[in-house]
Image (spheres, rainbow, N blue to C red):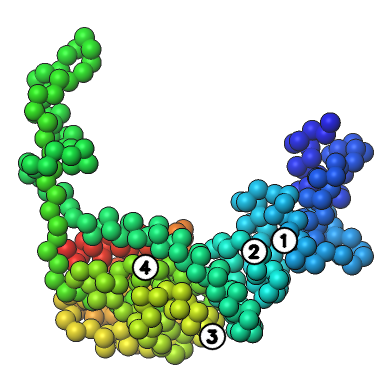
């Protein structure tokens, strides 16, 4: 029987790793895994030069459709998603999301959603209808997750006064322990609670605020575009919040009319092109009705193709009139961006908050300010 650890090394290295098995052959299932990995990674010149995985000299008989069927059968779900992501993003195998037969069978996931947004301009109407299924399912999953975080952020705050509703979620542990410390029992190491205390929960009084999301739709910002659309949809209709969503490259497109339908919104987004952040910021400034109740969220990597001096002026003017400006180099689940730090620092110097956030953190930021 082949040692599982040695077999994994053989699969990682490809044919050059045969020495790991001391001449033993792979069993049929492992050989099928090796063929599936070789179909993808055997085309990588860098790996071939390093002697890691070397594809065969003959043409592969596998089609993309066959390969997707094979990896779904041979690998766990997490590995399948990684292989699909590498096929799309690393090797640009676009028929993963442009072949109707593939789209009809493939399991939607975030990597495929990004691929659809990048390649939908290549799709004919039939393929686009199938691709929309991927967008709908992944967006639904993101909405379900974020909606919970948004509801939590806006549901109310705990205040430090006794509450009448003695519910477990309102239990004030710190105050209860402090009030009952005199009943500590050294022999058992326990505190006998005579009087438990509870928070009272109050709902914030919300005045009308504007939340203006300005989203860079250059290709590198695709994750942020997706999460901005979902965040805007979750904020839409909340009491005290009026949400705008604007996408930009060198042009500015106001997508507010579609905010309540993030699937339709994402299908309209056109990724790529140049970047004029100053123009988008100026457009956002023009949407502000009441400066002291406006939050302008500029989501960009800050690599400005327009006039950086104009961008700094617009942001400074927004801050001076009392609006809150939030510059996010990323709005996604990782919040780990690559961005122009020099320009971001200039925006921070004139009063913008600059950083990166997850969608849940942005919802909390909005809730904290709207509830004041």
Left or right: 101 in relation to 35? left
Give how far across and how far down residue 360 sits, in percent: 35, 59
Disc 3 and disc 1 in contact, CB within 8 angstroms: no
C-alpha distance separating marks 1 and 2: 8 Å
C-alpha distance separating marks 3 and 4: 24 Å
Q: In this view, does 39 lie above or below 271?
A: above
Left or right: 339 in relation to 42? left
Q: Which residue matches tag 1?
A: 68
C-alpha distance separating marks 3 and 2: 29 Å
Q: What element carries label 1?
A: helix
Residue occupying image coordinates x 80% and y 67%: 63
- Going from the N terminus, do you reach mark 3 or mark 1 first? 1
Q: Nearer the viewer, mark 4 or mark 1?
A: 1
Q: Nearer the viewer, residue 210 or 151?
A: 151
Give how far across and how far down residue 172 sits, in percent: 16, 37
- Determine which quarter of the picture holds residue 306: bottom left
C-alpha distance separating marks 4 and 2: 26 Å
Disc 4 and disc 2 in contact, CB within 8 angstroms: no
Give how far across and how far down residue 308 sits, in percent: 39, 84
- Determine which quarter of the picture holds residue 88: bottom right
Residue occupying image coordinates x 55% and y 74%: 132
Left or right: 82 in relation to 210? right
Q: Which residue matches tag 4?
A: 231
């Amino acid at each position: 029987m082949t040692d599982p650890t040695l077999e994994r090394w053989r699969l990682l290295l490809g044919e050059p790793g045969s020495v790991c098995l001391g001449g033993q052959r792979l069993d049929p299932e492992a050989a099928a895994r090796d063929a599936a990995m070789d179909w993808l990674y055997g085309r990588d010149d860098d790996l071939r030069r390093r002697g890691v995985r070397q594809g065969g000299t003959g043409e592969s008989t596998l089609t993309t459709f066959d390969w997707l069927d094979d990896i779904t059968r041979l690998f766990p779900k997490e590995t399948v998603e990684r292989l699909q992501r590498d096929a799309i993003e690393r090797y640009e195998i676009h028929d993963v999301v442009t072949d109707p037969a593939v789209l009809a069978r493939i399991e939607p996931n975030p990597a495929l959603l990004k691929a659809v947004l990048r390649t939908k301009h290549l799709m004919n109407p039939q393929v686009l209808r199938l691709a929309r299924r991927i967008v709908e399912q992944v967006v639904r999953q993101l909405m379900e997750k974020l909606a919970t975080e948004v509801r939590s952020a806006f549901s109310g705050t705990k205040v430090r006064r006794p509450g009448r509703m003695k519910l477990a979620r309102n239990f004030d542990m710190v105050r209860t322990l402090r009030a009952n410390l005199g009943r500590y029992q050294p022999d058992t190491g326990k505190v006998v609670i005579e009087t438990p205390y509870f928070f009272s929960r109050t709902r914030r009084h919300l005045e009308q605020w504007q939340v203006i999301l300005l989203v860079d739709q250059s290709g590198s910002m695709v994750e942020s575009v997706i999460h901005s659309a979902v965040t805007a949809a979750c904020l839409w209709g909340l009491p005290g919040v009026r949400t705008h969503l604007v996408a930009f490259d060198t042009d500015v497109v106001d997508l507010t009319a579609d905010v309540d339908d993030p699937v339709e919104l994402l299908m309209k987004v056109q990724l790529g092109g140049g970047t004029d952040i100053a123009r988008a910021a100026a457009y956002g400034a023009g949407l502000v009705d009441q400066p002291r109740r406006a939050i302008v969220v500029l989501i960009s990597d800050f690599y400005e193709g327009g006039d950086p001096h104009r961008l700094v002026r617009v942001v400074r003017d927004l801050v001076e009139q009392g609006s809150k400006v939030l510059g996010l180099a990323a709005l996604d689940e990782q919040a780990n961006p690559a961005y122009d730090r020099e320009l971001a620092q200039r925006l921070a110097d004139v009063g913008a908050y600059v950083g990166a956030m997850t969608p849940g953190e942005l919802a909390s930021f909005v809730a904290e300010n709207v509830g004041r």
